[in-house]
Amino acid sequence: MKIASFKAGSGASYGIVTEGGIVDVGRRLKNFPTLKALLTGGSLDDLRKMQGESADHALADVVLLPTVPDPDKIFCIGVNYATHLAESGHPTPPHPMIFTRFANSQVGSGQPMIRPPESERFDYEGELAVIIGKGGRRIPKERALQHVAGYACYNDGSIRDWQRHTSQFTPGKNFAGTGGFGPWMVTTDEMLDVSKQTIATRVNGMEVQAAPISDLVFDVPTLIAYCSTFTELVPGDVIVTGTTGGVGAYRVPPLWLKHGDVVEVEVSGIGILRNPVRDEVAATTKAA
């Protein structure tokens, strides 16, 4: 199944994406008004029973939200592809390099990624996101995939100069609206081996990143086992697995995102996360 979070009219909901549109699950399951609530207290089997129902909304008529709008935790993995390690000059780390994002730094597919006025060094990072469906602590690698609800595309948009103010990445990774998450989650029954998929990033139609997911330095089971050792993972948590080589910061000359650009992150078997880039002033003026 493809499951998207969205806004229609004045309300937020989530549902099953079908060829005919979106089956509004939040409206049907009153006890589970969000995807996170369903993963926490319900079951994806509740959704499978609705797959054949008529769509309530055309996809074009809704505003897509981040796949999980309200995660308890978002873990991002730094330099987790060999090609990105090479271009950045980092040695292969002995353990995953982890930083965090906040929920308000994310936008859904189709929504603008916001370039703040404090910097012109706005960079893209196409990544695979893992959504936790079953919580746990000290999860062994061999059982880790049993804790995954599904996968989505992610653009870990980075304000590079703020990222490098110190050795801690947090400021440059958390400006409001700088990260894209979506367009939806594909459940694991439709993607039994995510390592066989590929990822690509395009800026204004030009491919700037491409790699097989199997090139990850630390694979998905390893990341789940590691993160669940120092904290309890809960349903709806997100692990963003890292980007491959080709980011704008290491191109000659650097390729910084600017107002009017369109960035696409595509993971085979999932779909395309597409976000225009807007300057914060321009976005505010448009909203007004």
Image: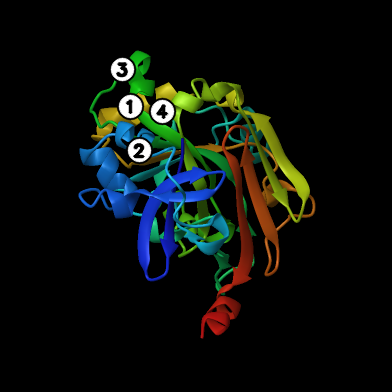
Mark 3 element type: loop
Mark 1 element type: helix
First along the sequence among labels 2 and 1: 2
Q: How far apart are marks 2 and 4 (CA)?
A: 28 Å
Q: What amino acid is labelled 1 in the image?
A: His
Q: What amino acid is labelled 4 in the image?
A: Leu
Residue 67 locus on image (x, y percent)? 43, 49
Which residue is the site of mark 1?
147
At 31% from the left and 17% from the top, the residue drawn is 140
Which residue is the site of mark 4?
223
Check disc 1: other Cα within 10 Å, few if <14, some if 14-19, many if 20+: many
First along the sequence among labels 2 and 4: 2
Mark 2 element type: helix
Any mark on residue 140, and which? 3
Q: How far apart are marks 1 and 4 (CA)?
A: 12 Å
Looking at this view, is 35 or 172 the one in front? Answer: 35
Q: Distance between the residues labelled 3 and 2?
A: 28 Å
Looking at this view, is 24 or 160 the one in front? Answer: 24
Q: Can residue 94 be seen in this view?
A: no
Question: Given contact means CB atoms under 8 Å apart, are the residues at marks 2 and 4 in contact?
Answer: no
